Amino acid sequence: MENPLIALLRQRHSVPSRQLREPAPDAGQLQQMLQTAVHVPDHGRLAPWRFIELRDEGRRQLGQALADIFRREHTDATEAALEKESTRFSFAPLVVVVVGRITPGHKVPVIEQQLSAGCVCLQLLQAAHALGFAAQWLTGWAAYHPDIHATLGLSADEQVIGFVHIGTPAAEAVVRPRPDVAALLSRWPA
Ligand SMILES: Cc1cc2nc3c(=O)[nH]c(=O)nc-3n(C[C@H](O)[C@H](O)[C@H](O)COP(=O)(O)O)c2cc1C
């Protein structure tokens, strides 16, 4: 019989944010998930991450900010395109923004700080899965746009590592096949 924790880890898969609905994790469940998420390797104990919780009003306002920026930067944008931008955060009832707090010039290279923050995102996905929710880690242009950073109150050394959309699936997700690790594994020296 497969180890139950291994089985749980292997069952995790993303559910597209547009298919996520209520119920969302409540405050206690979110705390549990975040406690799990920070159980990651962290070179230098920099804790190079923090979280922003978006629920109803936060998701609505962020969607509106996306549409406003998109309209400004694409003067020929169609109503459908603007609608797509404004609704990006309107499906999953909870979005956790994982913010990387990067210390430039530290002996721990920037990439290692970013990798630690990436581990936080994965751990958050796994914790959501363990509690019976589904999730998807998204970035998209908004994650890299300075005006979105300003909207969310990020400082100059902070970046969006992921928008982790969390909720309950409205439909059965299509589970994608995973790579064959045997083909990825070599031994050195051969
Ligand atoms: C850093 C990062 C950013 C991602 N951003 C997007 C995105 O913007 N849009 C998207 O469709 N998928 C994005 N993905 C992929 C999804 O999170 C997810 O991996 C994909 O839907 C496949 O699901 P899986 O988790 O079951 O493999 C991103 C993944 C990573 C690691």
Image (cartoon, rainbow, N blue to C red):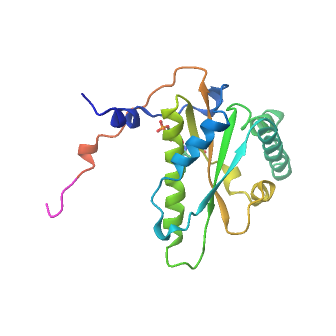
Q: Looking at the image, is 121 positioned above or below residue 87?
A: below
**Residue 179 sits in which quadrant?**
top left
| Helix, strand or loop for the magenta stretch, by majority | loop
Q: In this rendering, does residue 165 appear at all?
A: no
Quadrant location, the C terminus: bottom left
What segment is highlighted magenta in the picture?
186-190
Residue 2: give x, y in percent of width and height.
Answer: 27, 31
Q: Nearer the viewer, residue 2 or 32?
A: 32
The residue that appears at 47% across and 55% down in the rendered structure is 40
Q: From the viewer's perspective, is 37 left or right of 149?
A: left
Q: In this rendering, does residue 115 appear at all?
A: yes
Quadrant field for ligand 1? top right
The residue that appears at 57% across and 79% down in the rendered structure is 105
Residue 3: give x, y in percent of width and height.
Answer: 29, 34
The residue that appears at 54% across and 62% down in the rendered structure is 114
Q: From the viewer's perspective, is 130 left or right of 73?
A: left
Residue 18: give x, y in percent of width and height.
Answer: 65, 30
Q: Looking at the image, is 96 positioned above or below residue 12?
A: below
Looking at the image, the residue that sits furthest to the top is: 171
Q: Is residue 86 magenta?
A: no
Residue 92: give x, y in percent of width and height.
Answer: 67, 32
The residue that appears at 82% across and 50% down in the rendered structure is 69
Q: From the viewer's perspective, is 139 left or right of 190?
A: right
